[in-house]
Amino acid sequence: MQKVPMMESTYRKLSEELERLKNVERAAIAKVIDEARALGDLKENAEYHAAKEKQGLMEARITELTDLIGRAQVIDPAKLAHERVSFGSTVVLVDQDTEEELVYTIVGTQESNPSKGLISIESPMARALLGKEEGEEVELQLPGGRKRFDVEEVKYVEISED
């Protein structure tokens, strides 16, 4: 069973979602299904079929959340050393060709949001960066081809939740 690294805030959000689905949404969907069933012929009952489909999707999400929470490895990146790139590290990279500066933070798969510079620890880029120190060089395969970067800075920056 592979552990899933995540921050405390993500673990809390997933746990709250799971509790809401199990304790509130399940009962609400069951009520809608019962009401739709009372309308008669189930073969042509759109409300019934829509509610059953929603129930199936919800149960799949409950199963997914139960699995994620069960495999969660809650990590507080503020307590890690960040001399080398690790979970929660913010990495400043400088493209060796263009001198362009890129900033990424290594997070869990559930926190990942590349448009905000948050990359999953399981992504090829993060795997290439893990363990690197300031001053080292890294070669990455990007959509535009292979590029070389200098690791300019490795630090911890708290991630704002929005």
Image: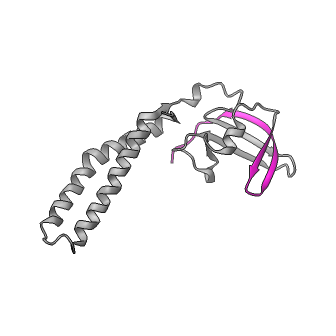
152 is within the stretch colored magenta: yes
Residue range (magenta): 138-162
- Report x, y in % for residue 35: 15, 63
- The residue that appears at 45% across and 34% down in the rendered structure is 71
Q: How is the image coloured?
A: one colour
32 is within the stretch colored magenta: no
Asked whether, in this view, residue 145 is left or right of residue 107, the answer is: right
In the orientation shown, which residue stands out farthest toward the right?
Answer: 97
- The residue that appears at 27% across and 61% down in the rendered structure is 52
Tell which of 54 and 88 is nearer to you. Answer: 54
- The residue that appears at 74% across and 52% down in the rendered structure is 142
From the viewer's perspective, is residue 37 above or below residue 114? Answer: below
Tell which of 31 and 42 is nearer to you. Answer: 42
- Report x, y in % for residue 60: 36, 51
In the orientation shown, which residue stands out farthest toward the bottom?
Answer: 44
Q: How many marks?
A: 0
Tell which of 61 and 25 is nearer to you. Answer: 61
Majority secondary structure of magenta residues:
strand
Asked whether, in this view, residue 157 is left or right of residue 22, the answer is: right
- Report x, y in % for residue 25: 27, 52
Tell which of 77 and 108 is nearer to you. Answer: 108
- Report x, y in % for residue 56: 32, 56
- The residue that appears at 24% across and 56% down in the rendered structure is 29
